[in-house]
């Protein structure tokens, strides 16, 4: 066994991993990466089909991010944000505020005149280290803001979505609703409410029989999921303590299984939440920074790629999923892609209104007593600034549209596979749900590890990704070429054929 693999086996405890299984085989030891390709100690190359667990945006070893970090490194790597400001963190905060309020031109005209919308502008940035801490910060700010505005006797309550995952720290786990991860820690958690989230493929209200297209496209329902949200909010209001905050991932829930919301759901439910006075807490840790794609334009004449890129970018030059349905949250939580996948850094953006509630004379102790050692880290901020510059360039817009289109075209071939139940794509995110029988949607029991086994077979063929239960995730870096994307989908098909043929023959 490779000596590094031996050291790993001796000492490293891996996240979300049954270590007994891990210790049975030699791990892949990554030594370098370039673009969408990772290389291991044996010189084998792999496609990074999940962008190193959803963090990497522009590919590995990107010359612009490398150069920005090298420049910063010559100045300083880190100094504390406790009592000190620094150059890249100041620049990054300003840049994040600029992009977090970006709206479609048409909408801007209407909204900029309304006082409510201007109070809702995201103006302040609290830096931390990862997605979980970005959520903790939002949660604590929303909690304390509510007590200060509704009175100190208030017990602020939060509503989040069934199947939600918002991170692994105790506050973030309290907002989560994945029993497999969270149940064991019930005794540590504070109570939150959950509401049904759209999951058209497995929705009890969807009366449509399975078809070989995305379940959102053929669903037959009466928006019962929206009705249930409405009920939750009014029931809580009747208890005399309306929800303080509504926590959601916009457009699709990631770790829940890449579960997309039908168009219109986000707008409707956030309107209801606002109507009941709840703060909107958008977890864009996974969906942020262009991951959900560049919005399509209805104009058919924009068929030529160049024109389409321009038209799509002009129509709504946003990088965030919330904006796709015109939703401006009170808290925007960012992490994974913030530094382009280079360093752990996160940001919680919020409004001037929330910020003002923490202002006062020193002895009033209204200070937000929260912070992390590496808050505002210079190297991370330099990487993030470079990543944002790349994201806003024409080339990135063009490649994102190309990745989205290529995936959509290639994925069609997978519908012929009998163990594929649902294929759902939102921008540059794909979930392929494996089922025992697509005609009945009968799932594989988790013990069979269908998802894990398919991903292992993919790794042997040079494509790396991780499943979520029985859902195979494809989430390539934005620089992935059509050839690399075709390979990812082809290898997934080969892996399924191999794994399921063998089982059937048993
Ligand atoms: C990954 C993730 C988190 C947690 O982020 P970490 O950096 O792993 O702490 C929170 N919310 C969502 C939606 C995520 O995908």
Image: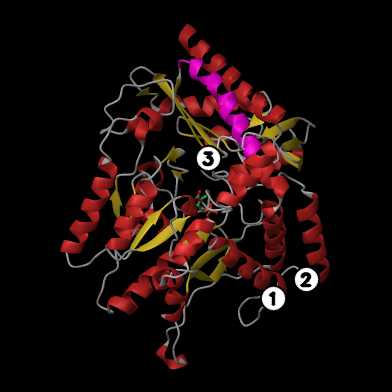
Label 1 SS: loop
Residue at the limit of the structure toward the top, as seen here: 505
Colouring: secondary structure
Q: Which quadrant holds the N terminus?
A: top right
The residue that disc 1 covers is 86
Which badge, 3 or 2, comes first in the chain's sequence?
3
> Mark 1 and mark 2 in contact (Cβ < 8 Å)?
yes
Which image quadrant is residue 9 in? top right
Query: Relative to 115, does residue 361 appear above or below in the rendering?
Result: below
Q: Residue at x 77, y 71 (%)?
A: 76
Q: Tell me how far mark 3 sits from mark 2, CA to CA.
A: 36 Å
User: What label does residue 76 carry, if any?
Assistant: 2
Q: Position of residue 418 (x, y in %)?
A: 45, 15
Quadrant position of residue 358: bottom left
Seen at 45% across and 45% down, the residue is 251
Q: What residue sits right under mark 3 in the picture?
A: 17
Name the side, left or right, on which 14 lies relative to 277.
Answer: right
Q: Looking at the image, which residue is at 66% across and 70% down? A: 89
Using residue 175 as the reference point, say whether residue 314 is left or right of it: right
- What stretch of residues is rendered in magenta? 401-418
First in sequence: mark 3 or mark 1? 3
Element type where label 3 sits in the image: loop
Tell whether 220 sits left or right of 488.
left
């Amino acid at each position: 066994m490779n000596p590094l693999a031996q050291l790993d086996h001796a000492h490293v405890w891996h996240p979300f991993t049954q270590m007994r299984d891990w210790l049975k085989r030699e791990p892949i030891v990554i030594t370098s990466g370039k673009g969408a390709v990772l290389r291991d100690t044996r010189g084998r190359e792999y496609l990074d089909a999940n962008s190193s667990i959803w963090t990497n945006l522009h590919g590995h070893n990107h010359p612009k991010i490398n150069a920005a970090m090298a420049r910063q490194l010559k100045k300083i790597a880190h100094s504390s944000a406790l009592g000190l400001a620094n150059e890249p963190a100041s620049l990054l905060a300003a840049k994040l505020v600029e992009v977090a309020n970006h709206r479609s031109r048409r909408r801007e005209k209407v909204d900029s005149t309304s006082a409510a919308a201007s109070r809702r502008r995201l103006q302040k940035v609290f830096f931390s280290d990862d997605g979980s801490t970005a959520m903790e910060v939002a949660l604590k700010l929303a909690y304390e803001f509510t007590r200060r505005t509704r009175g100190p006797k208030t017990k602020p309550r939060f509503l989040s979505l069934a199947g939600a995952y918002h991170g692994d720290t105790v506050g973030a786990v309290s907002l989560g609703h994945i029993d497999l991860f969270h149940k064991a820690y019930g005794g540590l958690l504070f109570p939150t409410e959950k509401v049904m989230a759209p999951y058209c493929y497995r929705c009890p209200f969807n009366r449509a029989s399975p078809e070989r297209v995305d379940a959102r496209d053929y669903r037959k329902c009466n928006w019962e999921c929206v009705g249930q949200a409405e009920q939750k909010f009014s029931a809580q209001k009747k208890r005399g303590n309306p929800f303080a905050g509504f926590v959601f991932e916009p457009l699709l829930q990631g770790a829940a299984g890449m579960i997309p919301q039908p168009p219109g759901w986000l707008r409707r439910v956030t309107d209801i939440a606002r109507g009941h006075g709840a703060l909107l807490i958008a977890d864009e840790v996974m969906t942020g920074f262009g991951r959900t794609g560049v919005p399509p334009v209805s104009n058919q004449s924009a068929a030529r790629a160049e024109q389409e890129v321009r038209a799509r970018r002009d129509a709504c030059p946003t990088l965030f999923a919330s904006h796709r349905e015109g939703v401006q949250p009170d808290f925007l939580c960012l992490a994974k892609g913030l530094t382009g996948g280079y360093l752990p850094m996160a940001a919680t953006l919020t409004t001037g209104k929330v910020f003002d509630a923490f202002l006062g004379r020193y002895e009033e102790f209204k200070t937000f007593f929260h912070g992390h050692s590496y808050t505002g880290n210079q190297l991370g901020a330099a990487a993030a600034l470079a990543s944002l510059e790349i994201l806003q360039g024409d080339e990135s817009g063009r490649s994102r549209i190309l990745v989205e289109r290529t995936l959509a075209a290639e994925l069609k071939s997978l519908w012929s596979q009998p163990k594929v139940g649902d294929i759902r794509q939102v921008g540059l995110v794909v979930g392929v749900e494996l089922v025992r029988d697509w005609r009945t949607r009968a799932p594989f029991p988790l013990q069979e590890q269908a998802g894990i086994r398919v991903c292992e077979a993919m790794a042997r063929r040079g494509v790396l990704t991780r499943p979520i239960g029985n859902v195979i995730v494809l989430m390539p870096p934005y620089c992935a070429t059509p050839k690399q994307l075709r390979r990812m989908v082809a290898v997934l098909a080969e892996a399924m054929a191999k794994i399921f043929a063998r089982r059937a023959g048993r």
